[in-house]
Image (cartoon, helix red, strand yellow):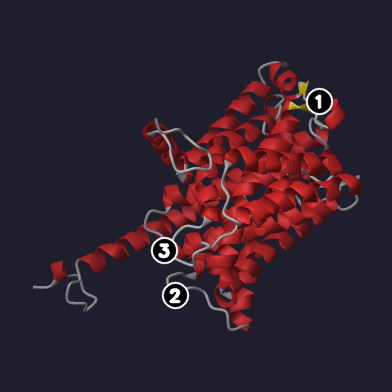
Amino acid sequence: MAQSRLFGRGSWPEASRIADILRQETLGGALLLGATIVAILAANLGDGYASLRDTAIGPDSLHLHLTLGGWAADGLLAIFFFVAGLELKREFVAGDLRDPSRAALPVVAAIGGMAVPALVFVAINLGGSLEGWAIPTATDIAFALAVLAVIGSHLPSALRTFLLTLAVVDDLLAIIIIAVVYTQTLHIGYLLLALVPLAIFTLLVQRRVRTWWILLPLAGLTWGLVHASGIHATVAGVLLAFAVPVLRRDGNDGPGLAQHFEHRFRPISAAVAVPIFAFFSAGVEIDGWSGFTDALTEPITLGIIAGLFVGKTVGVFGATWLVSRFTRARLDDDLEWLDVVGLAMLAGVGFTVSLLIGELAYGAGSPADEQVKTGVLVGSFVSAVGAGLILRGRNRRYRLIELREQHDDDGDGVPDVYQA
């Protein structure tokens, strides 16, 4: 009987079909949105949500006596960053980031889309709390691509490529920020020990070993030692992903090991890791309508909303325009500048990583953390709605162009149906 193997080739047909469904961007975004709604409802229907989130389990001797919310942020989210790291490395080695001329615009757009929101947050919170300056710098890949997939059935594929490249570079920079800025205590001994299982994992995957009962324990040990070192454990997911080779060993075309692992782990990330993290992180307590409006007047909340909606739009669009104006880099021929405005606004959907940075900056469950959640939810919602209005109009335009081209058999630019 064929057995289902995490790293192998065999799987039950039913499990394979379910996994294929879970790889769809729209479903991943729907699960994320559903988990967020459930979290907000649960947080406002009594103390059960907070008690569940703060329940601690795990061995204290191994520095793993964590709350369920902590396990979601440090453990499950490492799977999300593992998948993002695989995608990022694949882009650098065999994708659009391999060609500097094609990568220049989205890479610079990602940098501008992180710098301007941070400046907006700092400007609004001058004289107050600046620990959360990095919160509005993040773009949520899963949510942003899901929104684009729902509203953009006729948008140029170059738009999705631009957004994907921007988002993976954004994630890489966010990971660096988390590792450098939000690491309070560093234990060098544990970090050096983490290099041992990481090196063995690297050696095995470079030899194209995919045996799950060898690789998973090594990955788990690497994660545990990185967590004990004081560096946020999601960094381990990225380090493990970067160790996986992209190209095939025989030099032939076809999916390499990185794409194989990404194919296997994406359903786990989309259906388990990210929704559970969202459930434990997005549960903001709203003390009635007045409590919600009061939260919207707080500088932290306003800084995040303005950073995500205004900062991202100005940063992404402005950086893209400046680079295309003063360098040889050019916008893809299939795109227009209004498309970039919609995409820049969509980059303001900063859900998963923004919530994570907020917890690291202010501490889970603190009054400031509640303001962070309100700001992230409102800012992401406004950005998604604004982007949806623009891109939906652009989608209708591109649909009409496609219809004209389909009915213009002689190529004269005039639909044949209108010719005598």
Residue at 60 percent of width and 80 percent of height: 325
Residue 306 in view here = no
Local packing at callout 2 (Cα closer than 10 Å; few below 14, some 14-19, many 20+) is: few
Residue 226 percent across, percent down from the top left: 80, 44
**Of all residues shown, which one is farthest toward the left?**
420
Residue 77 falls in image quadrant: top right
Vertically, is 53 above or below 337?
above
- The residue tagged 2 is 333
Residue 209 in view here = yes
Residue at 69 percent of width and 20 percent of height: 49
User: Hey, what amino acid is under mark 3?
Assistant: Pro
Q: Earlier in the sequence, mark 2 or mark 1?
A: 1
Where disc 1 sits, the SS reads loop
Quadrant showing the N terminus? top left
User: Hey, what amino acid is under mark 2?
Assistant: Asp
Quadrant showing the C terminus? bottom left
Left-right relation of 93 to 420: right
Q: Earlier in the sequence, mark 1 or mark 3?
A: 1
Vertically, is 67 above or below 325?
above
> Residue 59's mark?
1
Residue situated in front as seen by the camera: 314 or 22: 22
Left-right relation of 156 to 96: left
Residue situated in front as seen by the camera: 230 or 243: 243
